[in-house]
Image: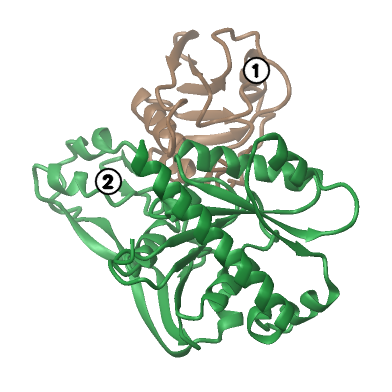
Chain colours: A green, B brown
Amino acid sequence: MADKPLTVAVLSGKGGTGKTLVSVNLAAAAGDAVYLDCDVEEPNGHLFFKPEAAEEETVAVKIPQIDTALCTGCRKCVEFCAFHARAFTGNHPMLFDEVCHSCGGCALLCPAGAIRETDKAVGTVFSGVSDGVDVYTGRLNIGEASGIPVIKRLLSKIPNSGNRPVFIDCPPGSACAVMESIQDADFCVLVAEPTIFGAHNLAMVYELVSLFHKPFGAVLNKCQAGENPSETFCLEHRIPILGRIPFDAELGALNAEGGIAARENERYRALFGSLLEQIGKEARHEAASDSQR
Amino acid sequence: MKITIPMNEQNAESGVCPSFGRAPYFLLYDTNTKEIKWIANSAAESSGGAGIAAAQLLADSGADELITPRCGENAEKVLSGAKIKAYRAMDGTAKENLEALAAGKLSPLSEFHAGFHGHGG
């Protein structure tokens, strides 16, 4: 196990439950770690880490370009495109960039050789370091339909060897971008709020990680005295509760200032430290029971 | 002149389908022969680009005018490329809409939405 880093994905059924709080603080508590912000439509982990020596690289996808002078109007590309990114009207081929999935099929197929692929920038990956944590942030360009290419590039940053744990801050929800983000994860942490709505969103990601056969556990955030529908959901579905984060004005204030609680506050250093330990235990347990199967 | 309308069922006495790209059928009315033809929308179930494919289907059917409650901007590009004029449907059956268009009572569709792409609508 020591030669492959433990990769932990942090997800939730909706935004604002505390994915970034949990993943940033887990990485900070680990000290020597890798943090990937895959919430590429609104990355905010870097606001806490404030990484130094930041570098950036452009993420591009292949988009077909049509030489209309060579196009014979055979419409093979229109018939072929499974995503309906191509049309042909009044003797003119048309392409819808944002519908194209960059499969390259039309360029391969075109008998006239009228189509070639060109790069189109769709986002940026920023990398930097914050007190021992490698911080990678993906940002999708405004107006782009899919963050998947940016997320793929982020995941390529996961080291193949070593024992520095990797924390993936996922996009909210349970759709394609989240599926992409968790596919390489060894363990999933589901962050949930203590409301009926929170329990509903927990149910969505619970269904997703079950479908992907990922080992997982829940972190109950914003815990207060009284009923916690998300806790009830965990108990009913035998979801391990890895930790509880209180609904705490001090934590809220620290977080709002862009501070990292696990670095600045003794109590939270202990809380996220023990959460980290709990995740390690669950992940090892899962790996052990996996190898017995 | 051929006029087309997105429809839920193959019945000209029924209402217009609220969706363009994902309508199960298109009614195609020929003003010369007064005949109605039905086109099954092969794009209705597609995962994406339904509007584009539906508009392509209509372009290939030789339609000149379209009556629809709404239409996405990608489909609009294909429609205008094929020189199909879009009119805003009114409440009522397909037949009533055809009569309203003939009487000059329908206004051209001027707003095209950015597409729902799996987010409701």
Residue kind at label 2, given as amino acid type = Pro
Callout 2: few (<14), some (14-19), or many (20+) C-alpha neighbours within 10 Å?
many
Quarter of the image that includes the N terminus of chain A: bottom left
Q: What residue is rendered at 47% in x and 68% in y?
A: A141
Task: Using the rendered view, name the quadrant where residue B56 is placed.
Answer: top left
Mark 1–mark 2 CB contact (< 8 Å): no
Q: Nearer the viewer, residue B75 or B43?
A: B43
Q: Is residue A151 left or right of residue B115?
A: left
Q: Nearer the viewer, residue A241 or B7?
A: A241
Q: What residue is rendered at 36% in x and 71% in y?
A: A163
Q: What residue is rendered at 45% in x and 58% in y?
A: A147
Residue kind at label 1, given as amino acid type = Glu
Give the Cα separation between the discs numbered 1 and 2: 35 Å
Query: Where B59 falls versus B5 (above or below)?
Result: below
Residue located beneath label 1 in the image: B99
Query: Where A252 falls versus A145 (above or below)?
Result: below
Q: Is residue A237 left or right of residue A69?
A: right
Local secondary structure at mark 2: strand
Q: Is residue B61 visible?
A: yes
Residue A24 rendering spot, x and y as whole percentages: 58, 73
Query: Where B101 falls versus A108 (above or below)?
Result: above
Q: Is residue A33 left or right of residue A159?
A: right
Q: Is residue A133 left or right of residue A263?
A: left
Local secondary structure at mark 1: helix
Callout 1: few (<14), some (14-19), or many (20+) C-alpha neighbours within 10 Å?
few
Task: Using the rendered view, name the quadrant where residue A116 is placed.
Answer: bottom left
Query: Where A53 falls versus A250 (above or below)?
Result: below
Residue located beneath label 2 in the image: A93
Task: Using the rendered view, name the quadrant where residue A244 is placed.
Answer: bottom right
Quarter of the image that includes the C terminus of chain A: top left
Residue A184 rendering spot, x and y as whole percentages: 38, 54
| Residue occupying the far right of the picture | A226
